[in-house]
Image: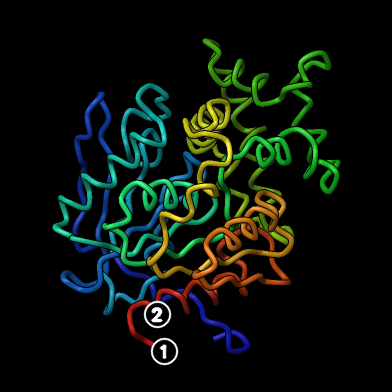
Amino acid sequence: MNNGLRELYPEIEPFDSGMLEVGDGHQIYWERSGTRGAKPAVFLHGGPGGGISPKHRRLFDPELYDVILFDQRGCGHSTPHAELEANTTWHVVADMERLREMAGFDRWLVFGGSWGSTLALAYAQTHPERVSELVLRGIFTLRREEIDWYYQRGASQFFPEKWERFVALIPEEERGNLVTAYRKRLTSDDPAVRIAAAKAWSLWEGETITLLPDPSTSGAFGKDEFAVAFARIENHYFINGGWIEDGQLIRDAGKLKGIPGVIVQGRYDMACPPATSWALHKAWPEAEYHLIENAGHAYSEPGILDRLIRATDGFAGKR
């Protein structure tokens, strides 16, 4: 325990895992941890393109939960690596339904942070009858203004030295639309160009998501294999607006009525500023809203992690 704050549960290995054929040439890696037959849940990682980590299993009491974690299309252990074809929000929503049916769950708790919150909202608004509860962190809804804040002008004002490195690869004349400029390089036929762009894109995010510098969080973002999938897939989703209408996920929040929820947001979240989570809270007032004053974006920040663990404990009936 840390000043009374809840921390991750002890390390745990999956009790089952495998690859699921989802069509279009894609296979997704999944794993199941906790206790078979306990409360069903699914964990949705960020990015898109971020992949799951062994630490993600530890957000749930293993005695009280039966949790599916999976690498979304093109990242982590899923194949083909960094593939953009047939890789959209709605493909992944359909993949979640395949996983739910495979596991034999009627309904499950859906847990997602950052892009995972986007996917959780898209899934819950499409299949509300399949969602028992929602636990959302660092809310991102893919509105144009949210993407512009982080990749054009906004967060750049807080991290000028990191921003200089992010834009250094892009000629002045292309800087009016950095997402498009990066798309050109991330899809280049030259592997060296792809990798350089991927690392610059990935490190910009990895080094700006915590309130204070945290090499243990940002370190993975500079590794070639991770960066290529992360940057290519993330950029692909952003340039296409996630294949959803601008503002759709907040506009359609009424579809969540009756689903218990918890929203956890860092006050100084530079990737996903609190204005978005506040807009969601106003549109979905039934959900608990927790604004953590001394936190940025990452789930690992103490105040955020405390609230997330309390949420999963609470929905499993543990107080």
Where is residue 69 shown, x and y percent of the image? 32, 55
Q: Which residue is at 39% across, 41% downward? A: 76
- Classify the position of the C terminus by image quarter: bottom left
The vertical placement of 229 against 268, above or below, is: above
- Amino acid carrying mark 1 in the image: Arg
Q: In this view, does 136 lie to the left or right of 28?
A: right
Q: Is residue 133 left or right of residue 105?
A: right
Q: Which residue is at 85% across, 41% downward? A: 161
- Around disc 2, counting alpha carbons within 10 Å, would you say few (fewer than 14), some (14 to 19), or many (20 or more)? some
Residue lying at the far top of the rendered structure:
189
The first of marks 1 and 2 along the sequence is: 2
Q: Which residue is at 71% across, 35% downward? A: 148
Residue 166 sits in quarter = top right
- Classify the position of the N terminus by image quarter: bottom right
Residue 206 can be seen in this image? yes
Q: In this view, does 282 lie to the left or right of 230?
A: right
Q: Mark 1 points at which residue?
A: 319
Tag on residue 313? 2
- Amino acid carrying mark 2 in the image: Asp
Closest to the observer, 63 or 131: 131
Closest to the observer, 126 or 10: 126
Q: CA gap, disc 1 to disc 2?
A: 7 Å
Residue 193 can be seen in this image? no
